Image: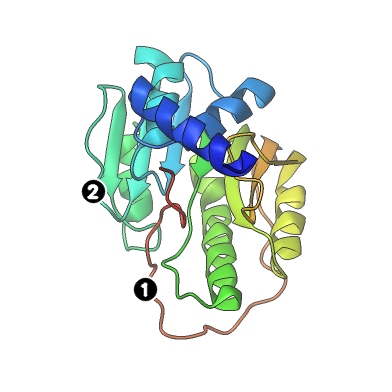
């Protein structure tokens, strides 16, 4: 068995033994251990939360005095009392109002975005759509993230990544690129960790034409986390 397959099997087995809904839970745990993103009482928004592995990690860390709001187009089964799930689209009318209500009219201390669009199988299109979703999350940050708050965002490597990184560097005091040990080495995914949100975001420098009339696809992981 190859080392990467053994590592994936290890985290898959461990997730089942420890009751996590996906092995992706360990990616968030490892990043939180490094960057100290959450603590007791934190308010967290998890965009692209299905099947709920990251929700489970966040729920435990913020404890019963914090709140975690998960958003996904797919229905996510409820977790604990401090966790709210919205079956919703970030581009739908009224989404911000529904999210703010779930946050009890506050802003989040941390925004998680482990998402991708529905795959077409054509890499250039899939990469563009994933980065476009990331850009749409950035558009929302002034409305949903506290100044000096943090962001963890999955992105896929490719031609559009530099534009995303550049925009995040202008929005946060510090930007780190992370590849948690629980990620597959051969995967093109990386995680962008923004620390110290400045409160505003720059507009996109280049507007791309739509590739086709788009539905948002699925706000979730593009690969199986099992």
In the image, taking residue 4 as reference, residue 158 lies left or right, namely right
Q: Residues within 10 Å of mark 2 (few under 14, many from 20)?
A: some
Q: Is residue 104 above or below residue 205?
A: above
Q: Which residue is mark 2?
A: 75
Asked whether the residues under the numbered discs 1 and 2 touch, taking CB atoms below 8 Å apart as contact, a structural biologist would say no
Residue at 70% across, 66% down: 158
- How far apart marks 1 and 2 lie (CA) works out to 17 Å
Residue at 76% across, 51% down: 170
Residue at 34% across, 14% down: 64
Q: Position of residue 15 (x, y in %)?
A: 40, 28
Q: Position of residue 75 (x, y in %)?
A: 23, 48
Residue at 28% across, 45% down: 86
Give the total number of marks visible in the rendering.
Answer: 2
Q: Which residue is mark 1?
A: 215
Q: Position of residue 152 (x, y in %)?
A: 59, 40
Q: Quadrant of the N terminus?
A: top right
Residue 105 visible in the current orientation: no
Q: Position of residue 68 (x, y in %)?
A: 38, 30
In the image, taking residue 148 as reference, residue 51 lies left or right, namely left
* Local secondary structure at mark 1: loop
In the image, taking residue 81 as reference, residue 14 lies left or right, namely right
Q: Residues within 10 Å of mark 1 (few under 14, many from 20)?
A: few
In the image, taking residue 76 as reference, residue 109 lies left or right, namely right
Earlier residue among tags 1 and 2 = 2
Q: Nearer the viewer, residue 209 or 180?
A: 180
Which color scheme did the rendering employ for the protein?
rainbow
């Amino acid at each position: 068995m190859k080392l990467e397959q053994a590592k994936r099997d290890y985290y898959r087995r461990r997730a089942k033994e420890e009751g996590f809904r996906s092995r992706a839970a360990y990616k968030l745990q490892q990043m939180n251990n490094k960057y100290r993103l959450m603590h007791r009482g934190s308010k967290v928004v998890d965009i692209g939360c299905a099947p709920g592995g990251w929700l489970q990690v966040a729920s435990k860390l913020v404890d019963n005095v914090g709140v975690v709001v998960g958003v996904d187009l797919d229905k996510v089964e409820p977790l604990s009392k401090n966790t709210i799930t919205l079956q919703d689209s970030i581009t739908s009318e009224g989404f911000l109002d529904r999210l703010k209500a779930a946050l009890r009219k506050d802003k989040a201390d941390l925004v998680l975005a482990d998402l991708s669009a529905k795959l077409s199988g054509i890499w250039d299109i899939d990469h563009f759509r994933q980065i476009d979703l990331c850009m749409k999350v950035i558009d929302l940050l002034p409305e949903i993230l506290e100044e000096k708050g943090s962001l963890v965002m999955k992105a896929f490597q490719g031609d559009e990544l530099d534009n995303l990184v550049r925009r995040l560097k202008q929005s946060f005091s510090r930007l780190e690129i992370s590849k948690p040990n629980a990620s597959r080495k051969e995967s093109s995914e990386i995680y962008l960790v923004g620390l110290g949100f400045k409160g505003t975001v720059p507009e996109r420098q280049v507007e791309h034409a739509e590739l086709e009339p788009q539905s948002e696809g699925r706000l979730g992981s593009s690969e199986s986390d099992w």
